[in-house]
Image (tube, grey):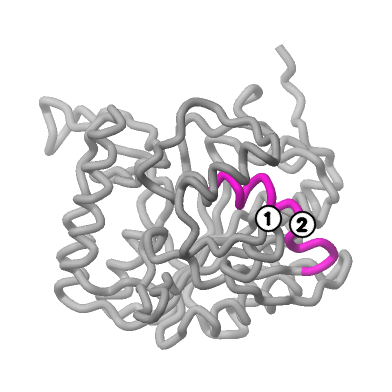
Amino acid sequence: MNWRPTAKPEVLRLRARMLARVRAFFAERDVLEVETPLLCAAATTDPNLASLATRYIGPHFPAGQPFYLHTSPEFAMKRLLAAGSGSIYQLCKVFRDGETGRLHNPEFTMLEWYRTGFGHHDLMDEVAALVSFVLAETTPRTAEKKTYGDAFFERTGLNPHSADVAALAKYAYDAGISIAGDLPRDRPDPWRDLLLTHVVEPDLGRGRMTFLYDYPASQAALAKVRAGDPPVAERFELYIEGVEIANGFHELIDAGEQRRRFEQDLAQRRAHGLPPVPMDTRLLEALENGMPACAGVALGFDRLVMIAAKAKSIDEVLAFPLERA
């Protein structure tokens, strides 16, 4: 058994300097740092994520009660926004079951923030400013913005908003992409995701920051959908050196629509044989009370350290990853 850390001392010092720069960035902008519980009564309903669960036995719950380690501080932070906190940020550990690899550890550090009165373009500009500030001692990077549709078309020649499953699948098979299991033939999104990760993403953010924005409406997650032809989700992702660093939204604040999306997630979980989980009814109550218009983003801090340290694996920037925990 190896007790030693996987990150070198100089990387741990770099990480500490970057954490300090994050806090300095937000202090300059008068954005409040907050802390919310890691242990939550509700789990993520997202069928693409799995929450780690535990059980509490004690006062208030003598018979025992399941709790979940959060996959993001998002829902609790939105409750603070609804209570009048104003713009806020949080640096915290988050947990996702089954995620281990070159870019993944089941416990990792997330930087998440919400800016009242911002749209997703405003927030993209602030993300670019933060990344430039935090990476100041490494290679300076300019930023570019591309719509999801333009980036997809540039690499594949397909319009992802209108291409059907047959066209997307044909491209994947012709490109020789290895497909694990059977992707559904009734929904284009799994095929879009396959081509995005295997064909589009590897070229994004080379020597710069690349923001993809205006995703298909079916991939809105927690973002507003803007009407149009086609309608699009006001959502963005940041890529640096082919790696996704951040995922942001012009936030959905409609409680009824949020409940509908939770219920849709749960229906998908049932269809795929995934365990049922409780939705966050406290978030829904907060949205019903009224949450201010805002934009929010989650940034993988460990991946940003990887960029700064020129690391090939997340293990190189963590003191003790899963196998040494």
Return the x and y of residue 39 as percentages of the image width and height.
34, 43
Q: Residue 174 versus residue 92: which sits nearer the camera?
A: 174
Asked where in the image residue 256 lies, by quadrant, the reply is bottom left
Q: Residue at image x 32%, y 60%?
A: 76
Q: Is residue 130 left or right of residue 165?
A: right
Q: Amino acid at mark 1?
A: Val
The answer to whether the residues at label 2 and label 1 have Cβ atoms under 8 Å apart is yes
Return the x and y of residue 265 as percentages of the image width and height.
27, 47
**The residue tagged with tag 2: helix, strand or loop?**
helix
Q: Residue 160 versus residue 87: which sits nearer the camera?
A: 160
Disc 2 and disc 1: Cα gap in Å? 6 Å
**The residue tagged with tag 1: helix, strand or loop?**
helix
Residue 200's mark?
1
Q: Tell me if mark 2 has few (under 14), some (14-19) or many (20+) residues whose alpha carbon lies within 10 angstroms of its own.
A: some
Q: Which residue is mark 2?
A: 203
Q: Amino acid at mark 2?
A: Asp
- Whether residue 252 is visible, yes or no, is yes
